[in-house]
Amino acid sequence: MEGLYGEHGDRLRRQGGLRGFVLIRVTGDAEEFKARVGPLLLRDPVLHTVLLTHLAERADGNGGDDHAEPTYFSVHRGGVVAGAAMATARVVALGGLPMGLVPDLVGVVAEFVPTAQMVEGLSGVAQRFSAAYAARLGREFSEAQAMRLYRLGKFVAHRADGRPRLATEGDIELASRLIDAFGHDVGEPLVDPEAWARDRIDVRRLWFWENNGRVVSMAGHRGAAAGAARIGPVYTPVADRGQGYGSALTSHLTERILDGGMRPCLFTDLANPTSNKIYAAIGYRALADFKRYKVR
């Protein structure tokens, strides 16, 4: 799949002079996409953590959480890559796409991927894109989640009773139950919690906090991408909250990422003031606000 498109499917869209031409390249080849948009994404690896992490995992042979085949979009203005996005049958990921590129991109995404049920990106960008995407397809949209992207400033270690341990194959059933509970808590249950748990455990990126021989919290992290590594999800069952277990486990993973020479980052749910307070106490500082919209 390869093409050059502008708004309404035009090959080129003039926006005032030669430097105003906007081209949109569409491909299903992750390596080709990475070669095009890499310099743009690498300007701020944390802001672009979603796309960079996805590309790193594809290069490692990991299809990601939903194992879908993505379509990739690069937006070129005046011969320079100005924006990037990807879409699967389930979700459109806009990353740090600038607001001004939404009108150019939305029609092309709707043409190639008309089935997406979710759009996520910078707050205002995601809202504008979702509205236009839904309108083009005769669908409706609504806000699903407000998030904040944090990157670590000065690290402050946190401790709690118990200890961290890496999840193993024998923990797949437990991890499946915990991630299923997490999904229902945030209103986005996974289609296959067991597959998610197995994938994370296979690549050694899922951890538990144990106290008195009992698992009281769970946290995962993604692989390193362009010098950054993203923590999440972090989940503590209701009965075990308030004891600092989630803080201690997040602190542990933060320290491991730092020891590996990477910069930690994470997303938080703005509807959960407790988690935002916890991450700030560990040393995380806000970078940008993101939103996720449902399209139905």
Image (cartoon, grey):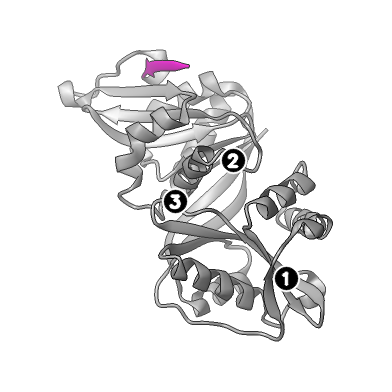
| Residue displayed at 21% across by 26% down | 20
Q: Give the position of the C terminus as an image quadrant.
A: top right
Q: At label 2, which amino acid type do we have?
A: Asn
At mark 3, the secondary structure is: loop
**Tag 3: amino acid:** Ala
In the image, residue 212 above or below residue 10: below
**Res 225 label:** 3
Q: Nearer the viewer, mark 1 or mark 2?
A: 2
SS assignment for the magenta stretch, majority: strand
Q: Which of marks 1 and 2 is nearer the N terminus?
A: 2
Gap in angstroms between the C-alphas marked 1 and 2: 25 Å
What residue sits 56% from the left and 76% below the top? 277
- Mark-to-mark CA distance, 3 and 1: 25 Å
Nearest the viewer among 143 and 205 is: 205
Q: Can residue 208 be seen in this view?
A: yes
What residue would you read off at disc 2?
62
For this rendering, which residue is in front, 104 or 198?
198
| Quarter assignment of residue 164 | bottom right
Residue that badge 1 annotates = 217
Query: Up-down: is 256 above or below 94?
Result: below
Q: Type of residue at label 1? A: Ser
Instruction: Name the side, left or right, on which 294 lies relative to 133.
Output: right
The residue under the point 66% across, 73% down is: 246
> Magenta residues, as a range?
1-5
Image coords of residue 75 (percent x, y) = 35, 29
- Secondary structure, mark 2, is loop
Tag 2: Cα neighbours inside 10 Å, few (<14), some, or many (≥20)? some
